[in-house]
Amino acid sequence: MEKTKQIEKHKPGRGGKREGAGRPKGGKNLITIEGLLQQVYTQAQGQDYEELLVADFLSARQGNDQGLLLKYHNLILNKGMNSLAKIEVNDSEDAIESKKLAFADALARLTGIKQE
């Protein structure tokens, strides 16, 4: 006996593009960060999210919950340290002029344009 493959015909309504499916054009996100923070503020009776975060951190610290404390420390270090870490560079006028000339020279070599 020989096996034959039966090819099923495409059933309407299965797969592919469907009329009216998906997000409508011009549709907006229903959830926003601002909206979430406002809900937290409202439901926390006027406490900001940062205040709640600090209170929860202190609660975990007082309860000696090491796992939760580690998560809070990671959160603070990952999010907070980026904004706290600043590098300030003070260059003299001579150093700035030297950098300008070196940049102009490198750009000239890259583009093949001779400096005047």
Image (cartoon, helix red, strand yellow):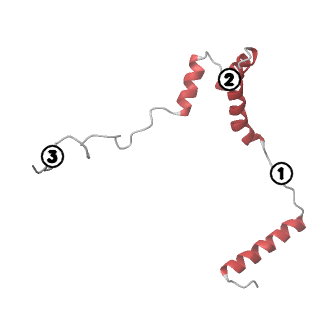
Identify the residue position indicated by label 2 in the image: 68
Q: Nearer the viewer, residue 105 or 57?
A: 57
Question: Residue drawn at (76%, 72%), measured in percent from left and top?
Answer: 103
Occupied quadrant, residue 91:
bottom right
Residue, x 66% and y 21% (percent of image)?
Answer: 52
5 to 39, vertically: above or below = below
Taking 112 as reference, is 50 above or below it? above
SS category of the residue bearing label 3? loop
Circles 2 and 1 in contact, beta carbons < 8 Å: no
Give percent across and percent down for residue 5. 15, 49
Q: At which x and y percent is residue 31?
A: 48, 32
- At mark 2, the secondary structure is helix
Say which mark, if any, is on residue 8.
Answer: 3
Q: Amino acid at mark 1?
A: Glu
Q: How far is disc 3 from disc 1 in space, using C-alphas? A: 69 Å
Give the amino acid type for the residue marked by disc 3 in the picture. Glu
Secondary element type, mark 1: loop
Q: Quadrant of the C terminus?
A: bottom right
Q: Residues within 10 Å of mark 1 (few under 14, many from 20)?
A: few
Q: Who comes first in sequence, dot 3 or dot 2?
A: 3
Residue placed under numbered mark 1 in the picture: 88
Q: Is residue 107 left or right of residue 42?
A: right
9 vs 46: above or below? below
Between the residue at mark 2 and the residue at mark 1, the CA separation in whole angstroms equals: 35 Å
The number of numbered discs placed on residues in the rendered structure image is 3
- Going from N to C along the chain, the mark reached first, 2 or 1, is 2
The tag on residue 4 is none
User: Which residue lies at the image location 44% right of the left edge and 32% below the top edge?
Assistant: 30
